[in-house]
Amino acid sequence: MPRLAVLGQPIVHSRSPAMFSAAFTELGIASDWTYEALEVAPDELAARVQRMPAEGFAGANVTLPHKLAALAIADHASDVARAIGAANTLSFTGAGIEAENTDASGVLTALPEQPRGRRALVLGAGGSARAVIWGLREAGAEVSIWNRTETKAERLARAFDVRCVAEPADFDLLVNCTTLGLRQASRRPAESEDLEPFPFGADAIRATHIVVDLVYGKHDTALLALARDRGARVVDGLEVLVRQGAASLRIWTGLAPPLESMRTAARAS
């Protein structure tokens, strides 16, 4: 029975086990495949990954804070993973540990329209931000980066040949890859409180915008709640999770992912 897992710290919140289990059931392979969440500290990642093939694992997803380290651990990496400089999907084969990155395609396929020609602002400078920046640039968007630590944003901007901004100007597409503004709320957020860490005020969000937040939880983040309130089109972290997970599933099994079953399970878990 091939095993799969998601590796991260913390990991208790992950919706991936429920999402993949639903996919296995829909595909009729639930008796053959399993998926679990494994908490792994950064200093234990390499050793843990090295043990996994002997334990029956066929692959693993990798989430915070391990995406950059996962690429370094791999014996082989796809062109996409190398270009991004991070991996979120590992496969264990006879050739060794193979790394892929499905984060970029996860965001791009979750968008309501293609980003070509749009002015995209990416918040953050971690592994997920690298994938989003690379994907949007490859798709023809005009990409700018902002990060609280400006030197990190500057390094990333140079690596991907995009702009680093200290005070974001106008944008069409906003993607939050940071942990800013994570207070989950079932009511309309207090704008002055919840958006204070962001490099713009509430008035910067308009109905013409597309707003993506990679964070997910029981309720909208403050940023998404505000964006919905202002009529913007929004994409939450669960939809991105479903899309990148679907790409990983196809890599491991070769089967077409059942998106609706995966989406329903992710939102219900």
Image (spheres, helix red, strand yellow):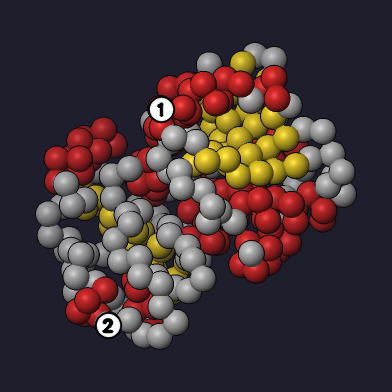
- Other residues around mark 1 within 10 Å, as few (<14) / some (14–19) / many (≥20): few
The quarter holding residue 66 reads top left
Examine the rendering and report whether any part of residue 104 can be seen.
no
Q: Is residue 262 above or below residue 76?
A: below
Q: How many marks?
A: 2
Which image quarter holds the N terminus?
A: top right
| Apparent side of residue 263 relative to residue 160 in the rendered image (left or right) | right
Q: Nearer the viewer, residue 126 or 6?
A: 6
- The image shows residue 164 at horizontal and vertical percentages of 18, 47
**Residue at image mark 2:** 190
Q: Judging from the image, what secondary structure is the residue with disc 2 in?
A: loop
Residue 34 vs 145, above or below: the answer is above
For the residue pair 27 and 112, the one nearer the viewer reads as: 27
Residue drawn at the location 58% of the way across and 30% of the way down: 90
- At x 56% / y 25%, what residue is drawn? 49
Residue 247 placed where, x, y %?
62, 44
Nearest the viewer among 157 and 185 is 185
User: In front here: 155 or 182?
Assistant: 182
Comes first in the chain, label 1 or label 2: 1
Q: Which residue is mark 1?
A: 43
Please, what is the three-letter code of the amino acid marked with disc 1? Asp
Which label number is shown at residue 189?
Answer: none
**In the rendered view, does 14 fall on the left or right side of 122?**
right
Is residue 238 left or right of 193 when viewed as pictured? right
* Quadrant, the C terminus: bottom right
Q: Nearer the viewer, mark 1 or mark 2?
A: 1
Quadrant in the picture for residue 249: top right
Image point 69% across, 29% down: which residue?
A: 57
Work out how far the residue at label 1 is from the one at label 2, CA to CA, in angstroms: 39 Å
Residue 2 shown left or right of residue 103 in the figure: right
